[in-house]
């Protein structure tokens, strides 16, 4: 007993020393780009990452041991935070995390406020390498550069930026080529460290929130699974200079504060909750939607007071709501002052930001599209969504407002012009909903564990079905010749072929049920949903046209009747047989101008060629086709098109093989070469 205690007393300081040494070494690599100790500097970042990831798992196992209560988790939290922080910095180094993308625009606030004392970003944009973006320098009413971004990230990054300044000054004094003007790498990388710290803090808040509904072990497992299985992990270790990590932390803290004070909130707590609401909106404007949580609570309280005829309770609820709103406005004041300086108004909408189209939401796309759909790219959130719905049924006053907030955020994000998040990874604009999904995943996990205890045959049957499916896809690969029976094979390449086979049979399972409905409605396989749905023409009002470039990545749009792709100079094309089909996916029907760039198969004595296009079976006026490149053009009325997949049949009067007309031995049946097919809304 005494020996074990001695080992524990010796091991704890030793463990902390290892963690701290690893953290210092990795942070120095990240911010100062040099190792404090030469020997440690020889480490590869992956080594401490792997060791500390294992340590984090061990800490979770210890905290989850039978009989461990909430105190055990609170004692374990500092160890977990330190280990995960160090691991996160190691992965930031491996993945090359840096200031990038929208992070530049948020960073401009910080650099300008600290070094210039203003919010005029012209010089900051140029220093950050954004001088080639003329739309940023279009003068505002006050003569400032444009900005469609928030000031909040600059505020939360400021302490880390200050630390980066100290590092930059020290390196500069030592003769290193490091500037101290807020642009060099110590400042930029310090912001990456800030993103990791705030993201982990948000995970802690999410754990505390989730453990209000389930045991701590299940809560911790749910947070770990949701964070590591969703887009959020990317914004901790790959693009931590985006706002998603601090945004998630603030929404998690706000939701936790709302949850622990529900039904017994004091006046002071209403004010603090309002300040949190304003500040999280300062980081990302759409976070204002999460104010629906206390709003729902207030509406229920008002309804109860009205039914009971309790005027005093109603007055107190209204007063609390006014205090909340006033406090939120005060916290949001820095953004209003920035807008006043940049645009001359305390409330402004930047012309360089994406449009919000409330009448045209892409609700199906934002959840299931292959173009950054929330559930299709982060399928673990399916579990969280189902669990949150179950929790809302069980505890409607707790889970109901959260489910409503998730629905509002989904609708709002679906209305943004670039609903897919531009070049971002995954459903990034749902960062504030991560704590909701954590709670939902924990509830779903609890229900699943209970179900397995009652029906232990279910996981066995599921495993057996997966093994059988693995064999069926392997047999298909052998049948198709992708695996040569009896010869050695790369499991990586073979696995890829099996995955393609699975996709051909079932499509993307995490787009169910939408992909199945799409397939039934359009008469295609579920596998074609991924591209045909995401690639719909006319889905963006700013692009009222669409083009099928025949011969270039066109397989997903072609039906039968085409030969292999060819190139002639800059043009790519395919030869069509007498009848060739093209699929044209449309967001909605409209009168469209249809253009086909083509030339007929020419040879001495060739008969006149003509093209008739059938749009979903509706014939269009025939077009003469000569042997030289030309554009056949026609206007197809709206009633001939449909929302979804449209089938264009290119029907030619005749086709011949080069062999039968004395032009070599080519036995392909050729009618015409087609370069592109274009549709555009008739103005």
Image: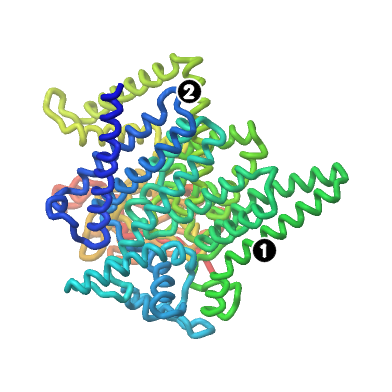
Quadrant of residue 602 in the image? bottom left
Residue at image position (58%, 64%) is: 331
165 vs 479, left or right, is right
Query: Which residue is found at the position 63% from the left and 48% from the top?
Result: 293
Closest to the observer, 238 or 535: 238
Q: Earlier in the sequence, mark 1 or mark 2?
A: 1
Q: Which element carries disc 1, helix, strand or loop?
A: helix
Q: Nearer the viewer, residue 492 or 302?
A: 302
Query: Please, which residue is most extreme toward the right here?
Result: 309
> x and y percent of residue 190 in the render?
33, 62
Callout 1 crowding tier (Cα within 10 Å): few <14, some 14–19, many ≥20: some
Between tags 1 and 2, which lies in front?
1
Quadrant of the drawing holding the N terminus: top left
Q: Is residue 296 above or below residue 501?
A: below
Q: Say few, some or many: other residues with alpha carbon within 10 Å of mark 2 (under 14 / 14 to 19 / 20 or more).
A: few
Residue at the spot 30% in from the left edge and 25% down from the top edge: 470
Q: Quadrant of residue 174?
A: bottom left
Q: Is residue 70 visible?
A: yes
State the mark number for residue 326.
1
Determine whether, in the image, residue 283 is placed left or right of residue 305.
left
The Cα atoms of the two marked residues, 1 and 2, are separated by 45 Å
């Amino acid at each position: 007993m005494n020996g074990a205690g001695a080992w524990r007393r010796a091991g704890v300081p030793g463990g902390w020393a290892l963690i701290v040494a690893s953290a210092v070494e990795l942070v120095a690599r990240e911010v100062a780009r040099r190792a404090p100790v030469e020997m440690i500097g020889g480490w590869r970042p992956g080594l401490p990452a792997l060791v500390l990831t294992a340590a984090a798992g061990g800490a979770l196992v210890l905290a989850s041991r039978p009989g461990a209560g909430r105190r055990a988790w609170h004692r374990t939290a500092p160890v977990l935070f330190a280990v995960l922080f160090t691991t996160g910095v190691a992965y930031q180094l491996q993945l090359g995390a840096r200031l990038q993308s929208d992070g530049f625009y948020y960073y401009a606030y910080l650099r300008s406020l600290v070094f210039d004392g203003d919010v005029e970003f012209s010089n900051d944009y140029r220093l950050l390498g954004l001088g080639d973006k003329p739309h940023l320098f279009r003068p505002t009413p006050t003569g400032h550069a444009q900005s469609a971004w928030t000031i909040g990230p600059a505020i939360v990054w400021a302490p880390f930026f200050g630390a980066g300044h100290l590092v930059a000054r020290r390196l500069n004094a030592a003769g290193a080529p490091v500037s101290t003007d807020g642009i060099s790498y110590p400042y930029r990388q310090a912001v990456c460290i800030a993103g990791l710290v705030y993201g982990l803090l948000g995970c802690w808040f999410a754990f505390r929130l989730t453990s209000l509904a389930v045991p701590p072990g299940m809560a911790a497992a749910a947070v770990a699974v949701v964070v590591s299985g969703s887009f959020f992990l990317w914004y901790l270790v790959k693009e931590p200079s985006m706002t998603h990590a601090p945004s998630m932390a603030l929404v998690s803290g706000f939701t936790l504060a709302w949850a622990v004070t529900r039904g017994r909130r004091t006046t002071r707590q209403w004010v603090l909750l309002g300040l949190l609401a304003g500040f999280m909106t300062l980081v990302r404007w759409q976070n204002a939607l999460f104010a629906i949580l206390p709003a729902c609570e207030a509406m229920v309280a008002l309804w109860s007071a009205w039914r009971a005829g309790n005027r005093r309770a109603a007055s107190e609820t209204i007063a609390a709501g006014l205090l909340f709103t006033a406090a939120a406005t005060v916290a949001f004041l820095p953004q209003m002052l920035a807008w006043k300086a940049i645009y001359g108004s305390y409330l402004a909408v930047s012309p360089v930001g994406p449009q919000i189209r409330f009448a045209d939401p892409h609700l199906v796309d934002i959840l299931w599209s292959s173009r950054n759909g929330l559930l299709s790219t982060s399928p673990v959130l399916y579990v969280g969504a189902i669990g949150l719905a179950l929790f809302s049924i069980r505890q409607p006053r707790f889970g109901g407002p959260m489910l409503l907030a998730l629905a509002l955020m989904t609708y709002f994000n679906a209305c943004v012009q670039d609903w897919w998040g531009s070049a971002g990874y995954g459903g990034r604009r749902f960062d504030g909903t991560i704590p909701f999904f954590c709670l939902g995943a924990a509830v779903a996990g609890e229900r699943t564990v209970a179900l397995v205890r009652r029906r232990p045959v279910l996981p066995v049957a599921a495993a057996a079905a997966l093994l059988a499916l693995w064999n069926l896809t392997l047999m298909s690969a052998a049948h198709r010749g992708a695996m040569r029976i009896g010869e050695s094979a790369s499991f990586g390449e073979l696995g890829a072929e099996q995955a393609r086979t699975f996709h051909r049979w079932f499509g993307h399972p995490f787009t169910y049920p939408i992909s199945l409905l799409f397939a039934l409605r359009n008469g295609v396989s579920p596998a074609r949903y991924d591209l045909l749905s995401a690639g719909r023409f006319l889905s963006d009002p700013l692009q009222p046209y669409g083009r099928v470039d025949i011969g270039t990545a066109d397989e997903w749009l072609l039906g039968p009747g085409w030969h292999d792709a060819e190139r002639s100079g800059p043009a790519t094309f395919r030869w069509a047989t007498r009848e060739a089909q093209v699929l044209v996916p449309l967001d909605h029907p409209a009168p469209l101008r249809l253009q086909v760039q083509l030339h007929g198969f020419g040879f001495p004595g060739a008969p006149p060629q003509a093209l008739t296009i059938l749009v979903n079976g509706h014939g269009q006026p025939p077009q003469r086709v000569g042997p030289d490149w030309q554009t056949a053009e026609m206007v197809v009325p709206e009633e001939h098109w449909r929302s979804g997949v449209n089938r264009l049949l290119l029907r030619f009067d005749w086709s011949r093989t080069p062999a039968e007309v004395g032009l070599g031995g080519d036995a392909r049946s050729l009618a015409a070469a087609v370069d592109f097919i274009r549709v555009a809304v008739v103005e």
